[in-house]
Amino acid sequence: MLHGSETWPVRKENVVALQRAEMRMVRWMCGVKLKNRLPSKELRERLGIDDIALVLQQNRLRWYGHVLRKDVDDWGKKCTEFEVEGPRPRGRPNWTWREVVREDCQARKLNKEDAMDHCKWRKMIKDVR
């Protein structure tokens, strides 16, 4: 369900749709019907899984740290830093992957310098506050 999620510039409605689909699967695995009205948190604890929004954020930050540690000449790093020339279309622009990652880093109080130490970065990403 999350294949390639490291590079998705997800919106709130995408996260909500993923959470709904995940909870349908969790209920099915636990053999619980919706009418039983058990909390989602309790069902996730039974299976030992985290919320899908948290997993998405961890995947993005893990990939971001990987890209930051790459060489300056690496094409993947150049792609993340690429700025498109010219005017943007009218209306509110969609969020880019970089903007989503910036919000994730602010939420976890991370910076680029932390990413250079792989062990520290990994620990800070896994740390759920």
Image (cartoon, helix red, strand yellow):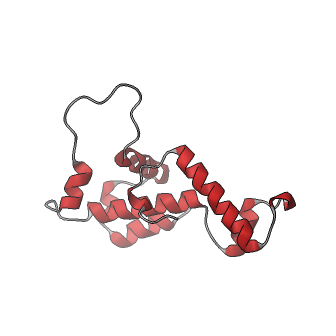
Q: Is residue 31 visible?
A: yes
Instruction: Place residue 122 in its image quadrant.
Output: bottom left
| Left or right side of 62 for 81 | left
Residue at image position (17%, 64%) is: 71
Q: Is residue 129 visible?
A: no
Quick check: 95 above or below 120?
A: above
Residue at image position (17%, 62%) is: 74
The residue most toward the right is 36
Residue 118 in picture, x, y percent from top left? 34, 70
| Left or right side of 105 for 68 | left
Residue at image position (59%, 51%) is: 17
Q: How many marks?
A: 0
| Left or right side of 83 for 30 | right
Q: Nearer the viewer, residue 117 or 15?
A: 15
| Left or right side of 118 for 42 | right
Q: Nearer the viewer, residue 65 or 116?
A: 65
Residue 31 in picture, x, y percent from top left? 78, 72
Instruction: Place residue 73 in its image quadrant.
Output: bottom left
Q: Nearer the viewer, residue 50 or 128?
A: 50
Residue 90 in picture, x, y percent from top left? 35, 25
Which quadrant: the C terminus? bottom right
Residue at image position (56%, 51%) is: 15
Quick check: 6 above or below 16?
A: below
The residue most toward the left is 73
